[in-house]
Amino acid sequence: MSKNQRNSDSHFELQSDSGAVLARRQTSFLADGAYLFQDELEVHGALAAKVITCTAWLLELYQLTAGKVFFTTTKSEVRATSNRFGVLYPPFTISQLSLENARGHLIGVAATESLPAGLTRVPTIFETRCTELPAGVADVLEIFRRGENHQSVELNPKPSLLSVKAKRLIDENYLSYPSISRVAQRLGVTHEHLSRQFKRDFDTSPSAYLHQLRLADAPLMLARGEEIINVSQDVGYNDLSRFYKQFRKSTRTSPGVCQSLMKPNRV
């Protein structure tokens, strides 16, 4: 992914090798601490991305002018049924997002505030008529509740019990850098068997999931202005060079570029 910074401060662009352009035109922190962003999206051809959340959750509101957006699950393909829709990604979830020749406007809100009890715990797509910027977390929850045709886009709604237990152990201990071998030993299976089953259920190895999970909250921390070395330590990397390596592997950009992209620049 290459950076394209224009002389004007009107926006900041990231352009991927596949032809996807993300132009971030507005970023700000809301009164309750939630992070708000607006993007212009343009994807030529097909683009797929695995969305993994950690402690932070994310709401995205799309207004497509062309193309399509859909999610792949182990059971089916879930498509947006209109050009205005939202997606809520709760904490510690995995989903597979795909875009084809998609163009449009995207509003997003990310926060670490706990979601209310009873709200969905799985990634969910829904129709919405909302076109206004949310003023805070309360607005986000109201947008979700008023949405229609809610559908789960969880990657695997029925993973094996072994993978469920392994994922729970990783989720609960990701900051301490748990050894996958020790996770497997605790569950009474070999490392190889656990890796095969986890990959079968979640389309990623437990080791790769661990690294992606640890990096999932890093962009929000960078947006808040935290020093890169502190973010590295906060997500469990005491080796800064390893943090850079894993961050670039996961996001195809550097922590510094990500911080420039996400820092609040508009009210």
Image: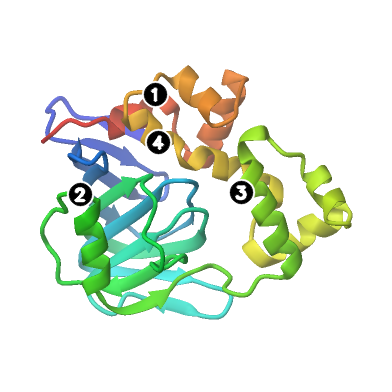
Q: Amino acid at mark 3?
A: Asp
Q: How packed is label 3: few (under 14 Cα within 10 Å), some, or many (20 or more)?
A: many
Q: Quadrant of residue 23?
A: top left
Q: Which residue is mark 2?
A: 136
Q: Which residue is mark 1?
A: 256
| Real-space CA distance between mark 2 and mark 3, rounded to the nearest whole angstrom | 27 Å
Which mark is nearer the camera, 4 or 3? 3
Q: Amino acid at mark 1?
A: Gly
Left or right of residue 63, residue 259 in this image: right
| Real-space CA distance between mark 2 and mark 4, rounded to the nearest whole angstrom | 19 Å
Left or right of residue 144, residue 203 in this image: right
Left or right of residue 71, residue 100 in this image: left
**1 is higher (above) or lower (below) than 135:** above
* Nearer-N-terminus badge (1/3): 3
Q: Nearer the viewer, residue 80 or 189?
A: 189
| Real-space CA distance between mark 4 and mark 3, rounded to the nearest whole angstrom | 18 Å
Q: Nearer the viewer, residue 51 or 2?
A: 51
Task: Kindly state the secondary structure of the residue where label 4 is placed.
Answer: helix
Name the mark on residue 171. Answer: 3
Label total for image: 4
Q: Amino acid at mark 2?
A: Gly
Q: Which residue is mark 4?
A: 219
Q: Quadrant of residue 236?
A: top right
